[in-house]
Image (cartoon, rainbow, N blue to C red):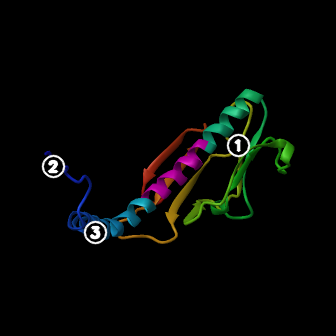
Amino acid sequence: MRRAYARGFTAVELMVTVSVLLVLTVLAVPQMAPFLQRQRLKNATMDLASTVVLARSEAIKRNGTVYVVANGTDWSKGWTVSTASAVTPASTIRAQGTLDGMRINEGGGNTSFNFGGDGRMSGTGMSFTLNPTVTSQGQQPLCVAVGATGRVQTTKGACS
């Protein structure tokens, strides 16, 4: 007569596996917060840089002026790309919502900029310093500098 073996896990095997998983989780969770904060900062930087590129390319495509306007007086609350200086739903190309956990400061205190049909920014350029609202040890701000030609450059550290 053949003996049938039970399949599955024993209670001891299951408890050891859960214990190891618990220890790994306790060790990994504190390391995730700074990582997520750095990723949020990088994403906010990419959102701002892609907005500049979009506004410039739309201005060239439409052969007209395209405006980027901060929501209120704070870039951290988001911004709108539109074909009119007074933003109306009909003229909106893209709207960026609030970036939670980020502070965005423009070097000159400007709350808007625009590109003409030739792809050039009106004015001499702008620079944005992006900081998380809660900084962790070793967290550097990022600088997004926009030249008068629309070239975007991102660097570590505050804008000078």
Mark 2 falls on what kind of element? loop
Asked which secondary structure carries label 3, the reply is helix
**Spatial separation of the CA atoms under disc 3 and disc 2:** 44 Å
Q: Nearer the viewer, residue 152 or 58?
A: 58
Mark 3 and 1 residues: CB-CB less than 8 Å, in contact?
Answer: no
Label 3 or label 2, whichever comes before in sequence order: 2
The residue beneath circle 1 is 122
Mark 1 neighbour density, 10 Å: few (under 14) some (14–19) many (20 or more): some
Look at discs 2 and 1 and give the one toward the viewer: 2
Magenta portion: prevailing SS class:
helix
Q: Which numbered marker is on residue 66? A: none
Q: Is residue 79 left or right of residue 26?
A: right
The tag on residue 3 is: 2
Q: Position of residue 144 (x, y in %)?
A: 52, 50
Of the residues shown, which amino acid type is indicated by label 2? Arg
Q: CA distance from mark 3 to mark 1?
A: 51 Å
> Residue at label 3?
27
The image position of residue 114, as x and y in percent, is 72, 44
Pick out the residue farthest to the front.
1
Q: Which residues are magenta?
A: 38-50
Front residue of 153/88: it is 88
Q: Is residue 80 above or below residue 133?
A: above
Q: Residue at x 84, y 47 (%)?
A: 89
Can residue 47 be found in the magenta stretch? yes
